[in-house]
Image (cartoon, rainbow, N blue to C red):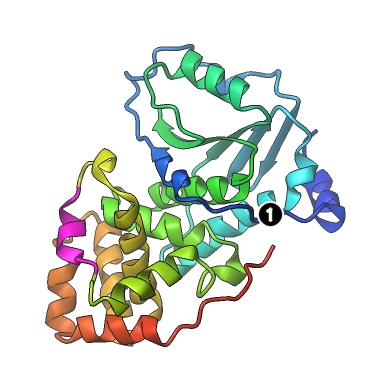
């Protein structure tokens, strides 16, 4: 199955996607950026012609071993991410290809990665960049939509920017992993961060920026990265400007330095702003489907 026409038909008549249990175990996901020498399998795996369902929609190339129209709403959300992520950061949209590999079975997914990427960790979803383009791998399950949105956000970011600081990479992926209607006040992190702030525990941006090893990030670090991204996107105008200038410098291949230094210079009382920002947001009572 292929073509935009088939996809558009399925969107208009496809089943609704659902958001299932959001256990913290999903934070075991790993985004891996691989050099070409790390994948020891067949380098032509991405060109295999035996995928039952293949679509090309804008920059996305979908490969699935099941009938993709049943997940048409998720596919549509990924297409929107290609536009929304750069627009949010005021970046030009890249036309660099992104390949999405989707599997119905966890067993088949694991076997596929073991064959073509031996040695990578066993995770339910993964982003890999190799030989010039980004790839997202995922299998269906209760968190399928969240998984794919999260990893596709990484893929879009790495198309737009020459490098992405780890805290920002994960914070933005956490932000955009939610459906659009729930990004502002529907993430489970919101209740957690409000509870932490109520205990006078503020996330340490300096410490987050010092983390360079993904394996050392904890579930709290993912939450805190999300919180800083949320504040920088939706907080005071000066904080938003700091984020945009920071990302613009990265886009221009300028070493940006610590964002914490920038925001202290421009908004000295930013920690008080941070606390007020989240105190004023009421979490959604029910997440949208």
Q: Quadrant of the N terminus?
A: top right
Could you say which is closer to the camera, residue 101 or residue 119? 119
Which residue is at 42% across, 34% downward? 128
Q: How far across and how far down the image is residue 33, in percent?
A: 35, 35
Q: Which residue is mark 1?
A: 76
Could you say which is closer to the camera, residue 233 or residue 161? 233
Q: How far across and how far down the image is residue 199, in percent?
A: 27, 76
Q: Is residue 236 magenta?
A: no
- The furthest residue to the front: 199
Segment colored magenta: 203-211
- The vertical placement of 21 against 62, above or below, is below
- The vertical placement of 240 against 18, above or below, is below
Tell me: 116 left or right of 263.
right
Q: Is residue 204 magenta?
A: yes
Determine the secondary structure under disc 1: helix
- The vertical placement of 175 against 96, above or below, is below
Which residue is at 43% across, 65% downward? 189
Which residue is at 23% across, 77% downward? 200
Q: Quadrant of the C terminus?
A: bottom right
Q: How far across and how far down the image is residue 63, in percent?
A: 65, 31
Tell me: 230 left or right of 110.
left
Judge whether residue 255 can be spotted in this image.
Answer: no
Q: How far across and how far down the image is residue 157, in percent?
A: 41, 52
Tell me: 238 left or right of 157.
left
* Number of residue marks: 1
Give residue 30's quadrant in the image.
top left
Could you say which is closer to the camera, residue 279 or residue 108? 279
Give residue 99's quadrant in the image.
top right
Q: Residues within 10 Å of mark 1 (few under 14, many from 20)?
A: some
Give residue 107's quadrant in the image.
top right
């Amino acid at each position: 199955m292929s073509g935009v026409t088939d996809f558009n038909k399925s969107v208009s008549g496809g089943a609704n996607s659902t958001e299932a249990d959001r256990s913290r175990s999903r934070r075991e996901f790993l985004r891996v950026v691989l050099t070409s020498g790390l994948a020891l399998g067949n380098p032509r795996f991405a060109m295999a012609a035996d995928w039952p369902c293949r679509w090309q929609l804008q920059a996305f190339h979908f490969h699935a071993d099941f009938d993709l129209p049943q997940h048409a709403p998720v596919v549509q959300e990924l297409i929107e991410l290609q536009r929304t992520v750069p627009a949010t950061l005021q970046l030009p949209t890249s036309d660099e290809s992104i390949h999405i590999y989707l599997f119905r079975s966890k067993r088949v997914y694991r076997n596929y990665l073991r064959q073509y990427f031996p040695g990578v960790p066993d995770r339910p979803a993964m982003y890999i960049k190799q030989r010039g383009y980004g790839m997202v791998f995922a299998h269906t399950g209760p968190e399928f939509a969240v998984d794919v949105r999260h990893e596709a956000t990484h893929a879009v970011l790495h198309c737009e920017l020459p490098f992405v600081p780890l805290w920002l990479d994960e914070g933005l992926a956490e932000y955009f992993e939610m459906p659009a209607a729930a990004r502002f006040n529907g993430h489970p992190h919101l209740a957690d961060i409000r509870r932490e702030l109520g205990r006078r525990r503020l996330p340490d941006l300096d410490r987050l920026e010092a983390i360079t090893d993904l394996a050392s990030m904890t579930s709290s670090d993912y939450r805190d990265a999300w919180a800083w991204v949320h504040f920088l996107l939706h907080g005071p105008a000066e904080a938003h400007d700091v984020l945009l200038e920071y990302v613009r410098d990265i886009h221009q291949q300028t070493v940006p330095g610590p964002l914490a230094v920038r925001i202290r210079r421009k908004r000295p009382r930013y920690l008080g702003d941070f606390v007020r920002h989240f105190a004023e947001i009421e979490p959604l009572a029910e997440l949208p489907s």
